[in-house]
Image (cartoon, rainbow, N blue to C red):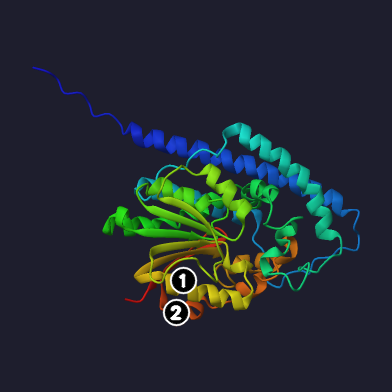
Amino acid sequence: MRRSRPSSPDLSGWVRRARFAARSLGRIGWYGAHRYITGRIDRRIGQAYPDYRIAPPQGLVPSERRILADIAQLQASDLANVEAGHYPLPDAEPGGLSGLLQKTRLFYADVPDAAHRRRSGDEDTTRDTNEPYYHQDFHFQADGWMSEASARLYDFQVEVLFNGSAAAMRRQGLVPLAMLMRERDQRALSFADIACGTGTMLREVQRAFPRLATIGIDVSEPYLRYGSRLAKRSRDRRFIAGLAEALPLGDESLDAASVVYLFHELPPDIRHKAAAEFGRVLKPGGLLVFIDTLQMGDEPDYDGLLELFPQLFREPYYAGFVNEDLAALFAPHGLHIEEAWNAYVSRITVFRKDG
């Protein structure tokens, strides 16, 4: 008579969690170290500008302990979503270690120049009032969004800013899309990521839903070129140059869309036009995954940080956005909030179109 073997532990679960922990902690350590070093460089350069002042915030600013606790909560949510089957384990960094080292070199070459630009006294956020808003030098970049150099550095800079947590915040927006895919055949759906940049959100969507036809739309052709080189080749994945307020898409042509970190960089009138465009291109019952910065009152302990952010990173329309009523902005165009939640310094809002 054969003896039955004792049941073995769920090794796949342990392996998955170990891989997740190694990758997540590695990212946080890598980008957190860069942020620390950048702060040291910035403070040293600041000594040459004794008259430079930042207006103190009226609201609360989170402690370092609170920030670390919220990052830990974000990572726990990220792992829970993986284990629930909403999306796969996070992928390795594009370009691997050699790519990271190359971006690190470019990043530190730009840090001193950005610190000087921030304190130079040039507070005019437009180079020419006749130029469109997107030609401004957001984030104290020397050449705004319209260059290959900016395209190579932007994603790295964002991860440094958020201590390696920007990708995890974006991935929270995959959850409502995963729910949609369980109800519908992804091969029959159409999806677009608006203001896709270099395609960071688009690549996450493609990994999670490989049979979904996707479109990336952005105003910056250098960003689109860079993103297309990183994307897997497929006839169902396209990059198109276009504006959020004048989308190159037909009426009711999308089943779902996402827009990540765009609206806080739009002037008020353009925000209204972009909201109308989402209402136009989504089908009845269509889904909009809207990811952007926290707004005032979303997380009261962060309100002071929201006041400081536009001063530190040259965001001319940020203060208006954090007080914008999103429900009132989208409701006239048939889009209503279905759910919303915070993820560290971001907020994910899910809109559903009437019908």
Picture layout, residue 130 above or below residue 86 = below
**Count of number-bearing discs:** 2
Q: Quadrant of the C terminus?
A: bottom left
Mark 1 neighbour density, 10 Å: few (under 14) some (14–19) many (20 or more): many
Q: Viewer-proximal residue, 336 or 34?
A: 336
- Mark 2 element type: helix
Q: Amino acid at mark 1?
A: Phe
Q: Please state if 190 lies on the left or on the right of 323 as rendered.
A: left
Q: What label does residue 324 carry, if any?
A: none
Q: Is residue 116 visible?
A: yes
Residue under label 1, please give it.
278
Mark 2 neighbour density, 10 Å: few (under 14) some (14–19) many (20 or more): some
Q: Viewer-proximal residue, 23 or 203?
A: 203
Q: Upstream in the sequence, badge 2 or badge 1?
A: 1
From this viewpoint, which residue is outermost toward the left? Answer: 1
Q: Please state if 153 lies on the left or on the right of 108 as rendered.
A: left
Residue 181: % across, % down:
32, 56
Residue 13: % across, % down:
36, 37
Whether the residues at callouts 2 and 1 have beta carbons within 8 Å, the answer is yes
Q: Is residue 73 visible?
A: no
Q: Viewer-proximal residue, 324 or 223?
A: 223
* Real-space CA distance between mark 2 and mark 1, rounded to the nearest whole angstrom: 8 Å
Q: What label does residue 333 carry, if any?
A: 2
Q: Residue at x 52, y 57 (%)?
A: 240
- Mark 1 element type: helix
Residue 132: % across, % down:
68, 70
Q: Residue at x 38, y 58 (%)?
A: 177
Picture layout, residue 76 above or below residue 189 = above
Residue 218: % across, % down:
56, 59
Q: Amino acid at mark 2?
A: His
